[in-house]
Amino acid sequence: MSRIVHSRASAHRAHLAVAAFAIALIAPIALSPTAQATAGPSYATYTGATADGSAVKARVPADWNGVLLIWSHGYQQAGDPAVPPTSRIATDARAEADAQALLADGFAIAGSSYSRRGFATLEGVRADEQLYAWFSGKAGTPDALYMWGESLGGLITELFAEKHPALVDGVLQLGAVVGGTLRNFDLSLDYEVMVKRLIDPSLKLTNYTSYAEASTAFSHAYATILGALGSTDNAVKSRMVSRLLAIQLLLDGPSKSLHYDGVGLTNSVSAAVETVASGLFYSTVDRFEIEKRVGGNPSTNLTVDYRHRISAADLTRYASFGFGSALLGSYAQSVQTFGARVAANSAARTKLAALGTPTGRITAPTVNMHTAYDPLVVVQNQRVFAGTVAAAGRSSLLQTFITVPPTTYVGSAPYGAGHVNFTTTEVLGALEGLDAWSVTGTRTPAVAWAALIGPEASTNYAVAAWPVK
């Protein structure tokens, strides 16, 4: 990552407002700084904890260029959210390779553990507020602030930027849940409804009473899938294959996964297992924590017509595996006619919406990068967010990228498939382009982005619409 010299001065900061913000927040912070030098860049490390128990960490290079990057981590398994984790560890970057490169280029980095695990958007925003105040009190008010995060952390960066537009000079969202919480959790319910109807009739859909109950529900459904695929009865195996592929298509799920390129029947089935399992875990085990957080089931499928999920491309792909189009249609009809219909708890739905529905009113250069084949936070999140930004009249401040994997690969995809599966080059390139955009006030041109991120990052990838209702 090449060094960019910053000249911000009064153009980027309303210093009095920032100082007031820092003073208001810095009181709860307990600080334990430690200076250190490494074999790489020389920097000072600071660690501490907030009054609510969040761990915080920052590293400031000796030749700090005045820019601070606040990292927001993604969803962390909560277990029973009533029982706090025994330890919290703050992370100040996506990976240590990213951290070392940023420090070498003069950027300061900081991050927090948040005070609570799970779908902690409000806690994440509050933690970033306190982190900024703590950092400003120790190292000085930054000349510029960039927010970056992945998955749930990508949403937190957006919520922070919308809440504090005067503070933020740039935002990088990686595989972010920015399509709206209601839309994402309604889709997670669709996973459950389809699995219950076509694979595991015993699956409980909502209102889990414990983490153990939710985990058992997921494990039973997953074992049912693996058991059928491992059956010596070819009819049982074939039936499971046809249903897994049907669920994947009806949910517009990715045909490639982190470990399987989706080329040929065997890899396609394996990719479908990985996709369905990822979505089902989210909609059962993670659902327990979210329902407890908002006070009930927040998702619904009352208005969904599952038959509308079938496209011409779906029929073609299904037929390529030796299954007739009538079979895919019959599965959709079965779910439509006999699948469970679930009403949301209205109060819980309102609370969930408040946990993370971007307005699109961005005020700083914003880069959103997503993998083309994400089984957990579907790539359509980017399309929805871009539409929200456009409706707010702010498209000139948004740059989107889709990283596309190779057509074939063995083992893990190098990039482009899987949740937040980005390379160090991709992430640092996105940050460098964002930095140049922020400094100059001019959007980084397409040819420069390609050189920074790599040819696998597409600005014109055709992202499908959100699965229709």
Image: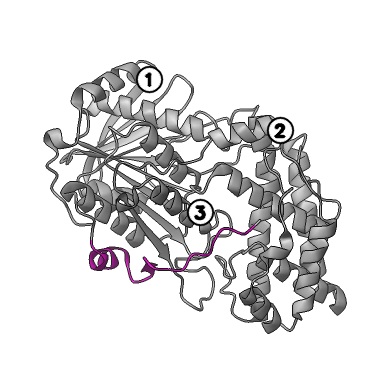
> In front: 213, or 347?
347
Judge left or right: residue 15 versus residue 401: left
Q: Which residue is mark 2?
A: 296
| Residue 321, above or below 178 | below
Q: Mark 3, residues whose alpha carbon is within 10 Å: few (<14), some, or many (≥20)?
A: many
> What residue lies at 58% left-to-right and 55% top-to-bottom?
376
Mark 1 Cα shell of 10 Å, populated few (<14), some (14-19), many (≥20): some
Please, what secondary structure does the residue beneath circle 2 have?
loop
The tag earlier along the polypeptide, 1 or 3, is: 1
Q: Is residue 251 left or right of residue 15?
A: right
Q: Does residue 228 show up?
A: yes
Q: Which quadrant is home to the C terminus?
A: bottom right
Query: Where does the image place residue 417, in percent across and percent down from the top left?
Result: 51, 65
Judge whether residue 263 is colored magenta.
no
Residue positioned 73% across, 64% down in the render: 307
Q: Which mark is residue 30?
A: 1
Which residue is at 38% across, 32% downward?
163
Spot occupied by residue 273 in the image (x, y as percentages of width and height):
68, 65
Question: Marks 3 and 2: CB-CB under 8 Å?
Answer: no
Closer to the eye: label 1 or 3: 3
Task: Using the numbered discs, state the Cα–Cα distance from disc 1 to disc 2 in whole angstroms.
Answer: 36 Å
Type of residue at label 2? Gly
Label 3 SS: helix
Which is more N-terminal, label 2 or label 3? Answer: 2
Identified by mark 1, the residue type is Ala
Q: Which residues are magenta?
A: 445-468
Say left or right for 266 vs 24: right
* Residue located beneath label 3 in the image: 381
Q: Quadrant of residue 320?
A: bottom right
Q: Confirm or deny contact between disc 1 and disc 3 (CB under 8 A).
A: no
Q: Of residues 207 and 93, which is closer to you in this image?
A: 207
Which three-letter amino acid code belongs to the residue tagged 3?
Answer: Asn
